[in-house]
Amino acid sequence: MKIVKIMMIAVLLTSMVFGSLAARGAAEPTEGRRFEGVTLTIAENQWPHSDSMRELVTEWEEETGMNIRIEQMDINALTDKLTMEAQARSPEIDIFNLSPGWVGVVTELGYIHPLDDLMDQYGVEFESDYPSATKDLITYPGKDAILAFPYVVNAHMLVFNENYLLDDEENAAFRAQYGYDMAPPDTMEELLDIAQYFTRDDMYGFAKPIGSHGDADQMMTWLIWSHGGEVYDLDTYEVLINSPESRAALEYGRKLYDTMPPDTVTWRAYEQAAFYNQGRVAMIPVWFSFVAQLLDERESALADVTGVTTQPGMYWMGGNGLAINTHSRNKEAAFEFLTWLTSAEVALDWVEMGGGPITRTSTMNSDIVAQNFPGLAEVYPLKNEAIDQHSRSRFLIPQRRLISEELHRVWFDLVEDRMSIDENLATAEANLKSIFAEAGLK
């Protein structure tokens, strides 16, 4: 098992990111203020990338005359906003954050402008420093087209407090109770043992936000997939959730929930990090986007005792693209802007100022990254391992939101003991069959 500890990360490192498009001959803002009077509206997540993007794009605005308007909103509001805009065929938004959570809906509604023709026109193409997983985030099953500029590729990691998991006295007591030496967990069974061991008094073994549909959905798919189960067959839409594997997953999940703080039902990611920094939890699963904050001594009181490893089991692969609205009146201007934004030179500027995604291997190997992110090279193999061995794509169909809502119900009916596990899974089976039947998928 690989364990990575980073002692010195100077600036906020953002997610496990590999995507951007390389531009050969793409327009640079050198032709005067040719976009004077043009306004591009970007619908974005509320996260460090979009926070720093606002500062970054002032250079483009000054040199081209374009105005960039960034609308930030939380994930649920962004999902609703894009769905309504797509249904209305509205030109209001020019560029938007494309997530696996809503790619199915906006694609089927014809809201995304395919980029292949513009890529040919401007000579934009992929280069060799992108992982194969990037393609999954900018394409859609059955659509032979590039739908977005790659932006973020993410993976789930497990952060742990070394004062607990690597302490000799704690290890001796753990060995006496469980019969083996404690170490950052490789398996789901080890994770639960450690979480239960450290749940005591005002201390918890594990802590994950579970309040939103997406958070509970993440939890449920992680549990089911990691126990060998499936929610449904991706090819035939046969519902498979009511299985012995899912039953074992829910039994495990109920035990794990008892090792978590009760207010995780209201948490967002930053609240999880704040709780970890109080020293009251042994382990937290986080997107790679948040790892750097926890390892940055300026932001985390526990930076020097924080370790990172891959999260056991099988999890969603996270990530996002930047797509263009097919109803936009400024599609070519939007394409030129995104080509500039994701270029190698601007990517380095973005990383140096803080909050920018690490977009390519060439960026990772640059002097700027070496100077600003000591030890980052150690993380790369670990996050690649998380993608290759512990990640799967989300459900990329228009019914994704309905599936998420059902898995959210399964989770809360489980942890609030509203029904038995057998009743819960039977209900989920019936509800998922109804979702697929109404969509004509079964």
Image (cartoon, rainbow, N blue to C red):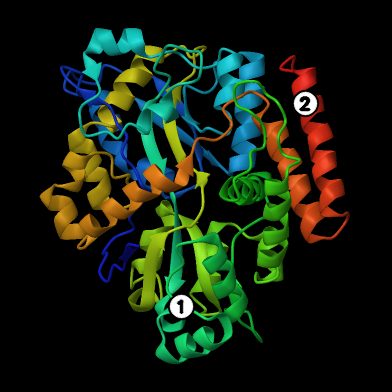
- Residue drawn at 31 percent across, 24 percent down: 337
Q: Assign a secondary structure to mark 1.
A: loop
Return the residue at label 1.
Answer: 182
Amino acid marked by disc 1 = Met
Which quadrant of the rendered structure holds the C terminus? top right
Q: Verify CB contact (< 8 Å) between mark 2 and mark 1.
A: no
Graded by Cα atoms within 10 Å as few (under 14), some (14 to 19) or many (20 or more), the crowding at tag 2 reads some
Graded by Cα atoms within 10 Å as few (under 14), some (14 to 19) or many (20 or more), the crowding at tag 1 reads many
Mark 2 and mark 1 lie on one chain; the one further toward the N terminus is 1
As drawn, 282 above or below 136: below
Q: Is residue 153 left or right of residue 434?
A: left
Dot in front, 2 or 1: 1
Of residues 67 and 110, the one nearer the viewer is 110
Q: Is residue 90 visible?
A: no
Q: CA distance from mark 2 to mark 1?
A: 44 Å
Q: Is residue 439 visible?
A: yes
Residue 427 image offset from top left, x and y in percent: 85, 40
Amino acid marked by disc 2 = Ile
Q: Assign a secondary structure to mark 2.
A: helix
Q: Is residue 120 left or right of residue 395?
A: left
Q: Is residue 306 left or right of residue 180?
A: left
Q: Is residue 311 left or right of residue 265?
A: left
- Residue drawn at 41 percent across, 53 percent down: 288
Q: Residue furthest bottom?
A: 169
As drawn, 30 above or below 5: above
Return the residue at label 2.
Answer: 435
Of residues 39 and 96, the one nearer the viewer is 96
As drawn, 365 above or below 432: below
